[in-house]
Image (cartoon, helix red, strand yellow):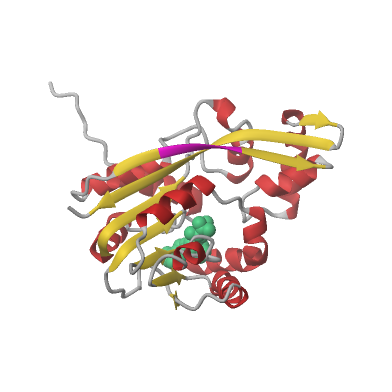
Amino acid sequence: MNEFVPLDFAAAWQAFTRQRYGDQTDKDDRAMWASFAEQYDERTRFSDGLQTLLEALVHPGDTVLDVGAGTGRIALPLARIARRVTALDHSPAMLDVLRRKMIQQEVNNIQIVETTWQQAEVEPHDVVIAIWSLYRQSDILTALRKLVTATRRTLVIADGDSGMRPPHEMPHADLLSEIWGGGAGQGIPNYLYFAGMLWQIGVRANVQVIYEQRAYQGATPAEIARQLVPARATPEQIERFSTRLEPLLCRNGNGYSYRYTVPIGIVTWTRG
Ligand SMILES: C[S@@+](CC[C@H](N)C(=O)[O-])C[C@H]1O[C@@H](n2cnc3c(N)ncnc32)[C@H](O)[C@@H]1O
């Protein structure tokens, strides 16, 4: 008897995202980003390693498409190298922050496109990136095929590891899943789903994982908690999280500190 059952990465990913975001509409997602857009850059740490890697893949003269560009954390640095960047996002609030930063930083080669990836009509770009932005696709394989079609040379998808293992990598992972759902500690790392799903559509990608140390300081546990909670957290949830987080923190002269390791998966495909 053949006991080998090929893993359907797409079906597993859709089940995982349905469990996490299933009851939220695109409108809900936009409302969530609207309430968080102004704090996004401050509250969300960006990976220097990822930025360096992306900068090395973009050549002067390139066009870049950033799908789910948000506040332009990566679109802005890439615009300094590329000829033109298309920053696509469905959240007007996130794009407003990007518009403001473009003026402040005197960047004028970013074209903003406000739409969902599902509805977007885009021409091919040399480099296409989707960084933590593919969590809302109800037909993920169609979304990935569209990314591949839009890629003239290099496609990069970056995502994290919802299945954090071993547990010491992120001591508060179980708390996050207890309060916000999503089953931390289960499943497989998000970036492996993406490599698997690309493989399902005939695209052999490379996977690179970088591990970054995150260090947080705060006068109180609540100060640290606010830096760790998901964007959709309510004040009550933050308070509950903060109380439960305290035993995991180290006390020091100035208050509290907290360190953990973040794995970031970078899935890259270059058209042969
Ligand atoms: C976690 S943020 C990442 C932003 C940016 N890539 C970064 O790394 O800072 C996710 C972004 O994806 C956008 N997004 C989510 N689903 C989308 C969709 N279906 N179409 C377009 N944008 C989407 C959200 O509006 C949000 O700005």
Q: Which residues are magenta?
A: 209-213
Could you tell me which residue is drawn at 44 percent across and 70 percent down?
87
Residue 151: x and y in percent read: 27, 62
Task: Look at the picture and state if 18 lies above or below 246.
Answer: below
103 or 134: nearer the viewer:
103
Drawn side of residue 224 relative to residue 120, left or right:
right
Residue at image coords 30%, 47%: 10
**Does residue 185 appear left or right of residue 155 in this picture?**
right
Vertical side of 38 occupied by 190: above or below: above
- Is 199 one of the magenta-colored residues? no
The spot of residue 13 in percent (x, y) is: 37, 46
* Depth order, front residue of 246/210: 210
| Residue 234 visible (yes or no) | yes
When asked about the image quadrant of residue 215, the answer is: top right
Q: Is residue 192 left or right of residue 238?
A: left
Secondary structure mostly taken by the magenta-highlighted segment of the chain: strand
Residue 7 position within the rendered picture, expressed as x and y whole percent measured from the top left: 26, 36
Q: Quadrant of residue 261?
A: top right
- Is residue 24 visible in the rendered structure shown here? no
User: Going by the picture, which residue comes out furthest to the right?
Assistant: 253
Give how far across and how far down residue 184 sits, in percent. Answer: 52, 36
Residue under the image location 27 percent in, 63 percent down: 146
189 to the left or right of 72? left
